[in-house]
Image (cartoon, coloured by chain):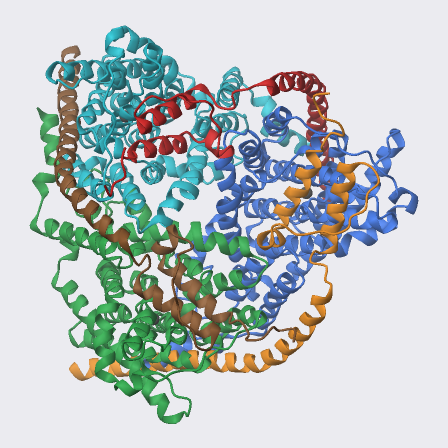
Chain colours: A red, B brown, C orange, D green, E cyan, F blue
Amino acid sequence: MASDVFGFGLEITLVGLGVVFLGLLLVAAAIALMRRLDERWREGERRSEAAALERTPTIDSTTLVLIAAAVATLVGGRHRIRGVRRLLPGESAASAWAVTGRAVLQGSHVIAHRPRGR
Amino acid sequence: MASDVFGFGLEITLVGLGVVFLGLLLVAAAIALMRRLDERWREGERRSEAAALERTPTIDSTTLVLIAAAVATLVGGRHRIRGVRRLLPGESAASAWAVTGRAVLQGSHVIAHRPRGR
Amino acid sequence: MASDVFGFGLEITLVGLGVVFLGLLLVAAAIALMRRLDERWREGERRSEAAALERTPTIDSTTLVLIAAAVATLVGGRHRIRGVRRLLPGESAASAWAVTGRAVLQGSHVIAHRPRGR
Amino acid sequence: METLDDFLAAGALGNLSWGNLGMLAVGVLFLWLAVHKDYEPLLLVPIGFGILIGNIPYATGLGIGIYESGSVLSILYQGVTSGWYPPLIFLGIGAMTDFSCMLSNPRLVLLGAAAQVGIFGALWAALALGFDAPHAAAIGIIGGADGPTAIFLSSKLAPDYLGAIAIAAYSYMALVPVIQPPIIRLLTSPAERRIRMKPNRPVSKRMRILFPVVAFLLTAFIAPGSISLLGMLFFGNLLKESGVTERLAQTARNAFLDAITILLGLTVGASTDAERFLTPASIQIFLLGAGSFALATAGGVLFAKLMNLFSSEKINPIIGCAGVSAVPDSARVAQLVAAEEDPQNFVIMHAMAPNVAGVIGSAIAAGVLLAALR
Amino acid sequence: METLDDFLAAGALGNLSWGNLGMLAVGVLFLWLAVHKDYEPLLLVPIGFGILIGNIPYATGLGIGIYESGSVLSILYQGVTSGWYPPLIFLGIGAMTDFSCMLSNPRLVLLGAAAQVGIFGALWAALALGFDAPHAAAIGIIGGADGPTAIFLSSKLAPDYLGAIAIAAYSYMALVPVIQPPIIRLLTSPAERRIRMKPNRPVSKRMRILFPVVAFLLTAFIAPGSISLLGMLFFGNLLKESGVTERLAQTARNAFLDAITILLGLTVGASTDAERFLTPASIQIFLLGAGSFALATAGGVLFAKLMNLFSSEKINPIIGCAGVSAVPDSARVAQLVAAEEDPQNFVIMHAMAPNVAGVIGSAIAAGVLLAALR
Amino acid sequence: METLDDFLAAGALGNLSWGNLGMLAVGVLFLWLAVHKDYEPLLLVPIGFGILIGNIPYATGLGIGIYESGSVLSILYQGVTSGWYPPLIFLGIGAMTDFSCMLSNPRLVLLGAAAQVGIFGALWAALALGFDAPHAAAIGIIGGADGPTAIFLSSKLAPDYLGAIAIAAYSYMALVPVIQPPIIRLLTSPAERRIRMKPNRPVSKRMRILFPVVAFLLTAFIAPGSISLLGMLFFGNLLKESGVTERLAQTARNAFLDAITILLGLTVGASTDAERFLTPASIQIFLLGAGSFALATAGGVLFAKLMNLFSSEKINPIIGCAGVSAVPDSARVAQLVAAEEDPQNFVIMHAMAPNVAGVIGSAIAAGVLLAALR
Ligand code: NA
Ligand code: NA
Ligand code: NA
């Protein structure tokens, strides 16, 4: 009985620790491999970043159109958009619903062309 | 069999599309009706807003009493409240629990009349 | 029947109200007792607070080491930490995970010693 | 055109009853009270919209009604019927409540006990009207003026009356500013209403940390039946006060509390379909509830006057009304009534003590009733 | 070495099939589309990773697969199979949606009805291909372009096809910018695409509060089967608009919506193991779905042209494509196509009206199909 | 006075046992450690208060105990017994964890594997003490130093010991700063402890996005039994790193994680009523757990020394102790011990690598044990 327990414990220890080491070895190897590829990516990124620094649109064209639309609606006359600066960088890009919500809100709260009280 | 399927498909399409159109037609009609009423409401609102702009309490009387109480407790002497400005506009108005929490918190952290270190 | 109902109602009222009063009486008594102890605690606290005001570390030593580590990594040369000011007072202290996350993040975004573009 | 027939048979218009129309009107009324009158909107908006949802008539068998097993509404309603929404609401309330008012004025705690007389008075009256004991107890708990406590107890003792009891409790909680002032004025003299009380003393952090642990142990030993509610209440409060679990307290009092409030309000509202709700019993429940609130108010006020007989430091009896928990409305009522006599008299901080004590008191009462009648 | 044998038998490598490999590639593709192409990342990241989880092969009996009773995944999947995730997502969407665009332009609502022709066209085609009625209806609903609606209806009518229907619906929603433009260009002339519409008028707060209540009552009476979805949608919207329940609306559109989105996406993805998913039926479902989207787009555009025949105030027919809800992508598509002809023509605000009306329209259609076929 | 009798019979005082008193003292001790000593308060406050709740004695039949079917506590406890709380906690942890430390130093990952020797050592010892294999495995997993992993595995293999195993795991995790330093000092020379390592290199965003996908596929193929835990961990991490699902990651690591932490801690604590918890087996479990932690620490440190034999770039063996996950405490311990020898030696960033690798390692071990013994 005692030797059975010993044998079973040995077996499960060998298999278990073996799989743990195998799994993490593979992960480590994958990371090492990815680092190699990464070096090249980073090199490319660095170059494109430098290029991008010169003068980049920090906003995609759809959003630009949306803003143009909003401005056109609000101003209601002649105008020219000279530049667009993003205010909420992080989440807004990710959440389509949030962007829409904002776009629609702007549409619904059209500023009257003259003060209301008049 | 094929004609059965055709017939069933036709029936469910007619009923289904019909109900969808009926539902959204009713919604559209209700909106149109509400818009009519809305015009009048807006007219009234505009007038009352103009009147309200003159000099409005931006805080309800209960809250004013609460603030008066807090001030009385803290100052502990003669005082006159000259005006109250709301700091957290949005949520605070809605959440009775939050308002209470704040009121009670203020009550529990009474500022000593003299600096503690003395 | 009517008297049965009356009797049962009386019994449950006596037991129920009795337990409610007993429970809240015990709570009130415990509070009163705690207030006594509290007075002494507060006295002690006041004294230690006064002492603490003189010049206290507002940050625990582990965190200080973490910050020192981060600074050493970033600056990469000779430096001396002259003081540490906590930026996120409330939650950060409580959440070990958050603190770690932050420490690790800092470690992973090592600032290059020279501008990338060069 | 079998499909059309099927559709019409399942439709709302064919199944519409006057009862449903009446309940729809009640739902709209609740929404109007909440939105326009600002009466407890966090409760009445979900309940009001829930009443609308619950009273759209439809053929059964579609699997959409709250009483049809497997429907979405019935799944969300399980938190009510099996009673686990209320303790989670108490968790959030605990993470929100500052018990300092009680800690700096322990004798006011007794006013929160006295107001529970409303529970037992209504219980008695319900017995007299012929309700059996568990149902009478669940009806009585309306007088505790605590929505979650009422829902918790009725889910255990009177599931068939749950809707009526919950709606009655929340309605009267919203109506506290209407119900209480005349009773207070009737039972107190102007001189009494002008009594000023000493400002609260500050409470140390250590005491606020110890309190939820000590109070939990005491109340749980006295009335173990109240563990579900009071355990969560004091646990939430410890999360708030400990100073080391602020992020848990934040979640408990925000996302957690809001999510459960939405689901509880909506499903309780939806459980009130006309057929089950518009019964003679419901009318009796509403009448008993009104009496219960009135009696609870009177109990708190009169007990304060009684305490004044034996104490030199007088209590303004108005704050007795705050023992009817309905946090924080009844404390506000106390302040409003006090200010009528003397606008410079600020009793609201004192009224918060019986107010939160009343929450504990009615949870204890619920525990006793649960232990005795289940 | 019995343990080793046990372990290998339970292992992934022994059980790997070409189907699993293919699905893993699909999962990676979804993640790439989401992360690199920014196609609906809030949906495709959870679904894509779920596909990976669902296609790791393993011996059954470990209690970890989504189809093994009692496993973690199967428990989280219950919200999909019993259909309560979708209504809660609608609650969050309601608390996020501004219906002002519809309120200021009610006739555009009809475009949201016309686009539902895609649902019934696909239903018909599915019947012709030999699917039985409930399955055909669940396949048709892909044309509603609404993930939660599609999942809700298929959980009731075609649980065995749920994975394929959900994946098809979400895939085509992500592909809306690819599918719609050519159809729009085919069906409209450049002159039509240059039509300018008057800017939206402002909408009063009171009207925005009344709308969810009125719209709920109307649609629920017409199609009670849609109560689960539309009740939650309009309830969420009332929480948002009422002005007195902002904290509930906040929670509904943030923590609540995000949590359900994570669980729904992940488990729907994980339900697509190769053996169940890679079938001829799935291919048919995908083909029918594509046709359904195309037909819905055409329906919306052509109906706009039809309306122009009877009205002096012309509608730009491009915005008809937005009746295919897929909020807000199809409204953006409308804007992009309009800007090709005239960069100063801003139709997106108008396109939002059929866009949100399309959500209501497909929920009504789902209600009808549920009532007729369940 | 039958009611009074009923009430007393149901009461706490009549049923009080010495065991309960002892457990109440343990609960208070946990709260004191958490609040006053700041030992893992986010875990120990809920567990400590849960122990209080679970050890208030009461007559059964009231339907309030955690082991009474249908009670509130038993419903909330289902997330533990059916094992779905732990994966959701891993989701939140994944959305919080930055794996950059591992990515910039892949060979340190092996230290996280070496520390898992504690698991198998304790398993062996438990077998020798007469526990059967599944129970021994669940006891061994304490050495993984990961609360959710321990709870997950014991819910599957040893539900009757779940409370003891969970409490042991969390206790020792809180005591890591006490357990580890002497072992480290015993096994390393001052010169070794002064080894300085090169600062971590930065890691590109793309690599951080790819990592969770690649690591999931590799570990899931090797040990499919770990899918429930690792799938959620890497999914959460992808939500964090993808850059396009930030709002989902936010919710996962805040509201979601906090809510589950509260419920898991409270119910695990409440499951330790004296009668079930105070047994000889529990004492053995605690002793085995202590040994397991010690062995895991030794394993990590010695393996680091072994690696130094074969590598020119020396590892400071102190950081081997961080392979015992207990994130982030054991990494902090490494830093503190290192700073004793050389205050300018900052090893904490390197120690984070085995630290997070240890989380993965013990989840893999749990997967193997689940596959072999279930
Ligand atoms: Na009460
Ligand atoms: Na649609
Ligand atoms: Na570990």
In the image, D46 versus D9, the foreground residue is D46
Of residues F200 and D133, the one drawn nearer to the viewer in this rendering:
F200
Tell me: D114 left or right of F217. Answer: left
Can I make out residue B32 in this image?
A: yes
Q: Quadrant of the C terminus of chain B?
A: bottom right
| Residue at the (44%, 43%) spot, across then down | E255
- In this rendering, the answer to whether F244 lies above or below F64 is above
Q: Residue furthest front?
A: A118
> Residue B9 in the image: x percent, y percent?
17, 18
Q: Quadrant of residue F218?
A: top right
- Res. D152 image quadrant: bottom left
How many numbered dots are placed on residues in this image? Answer: 0
Residue D95 vs F219, above or below: the answer is below
Residue for point 54% across, 53% down: D247
**Residue A6 in view (yes/no):** no
In the image, is residue A38 above or below residue D280?
A: above
Give residue D147's position: percent from left, percent from top.
31, 62
Relative to residue E219, is residue F249 drawn left or right?
right
Give the x, y percent position of residue E32: 52, 20
**Nearer to the camera, F289 or B44:** B44
Residue A35 located left or right of residue F343: left
Q: Position of residue E372 (x, y in %)?
A: 17, 29
Residue E296 lies in quadrant: top left
Quarter for ligand 2?
top left
Q: Residue at x 16, y 12 (%)?
A: B1
D51 vs D243: above or below: above
Q: Residue at left 49%, top 63%?
A: D235
Judge by depth and name the residue closer to the eye, E111 or F29.
E111
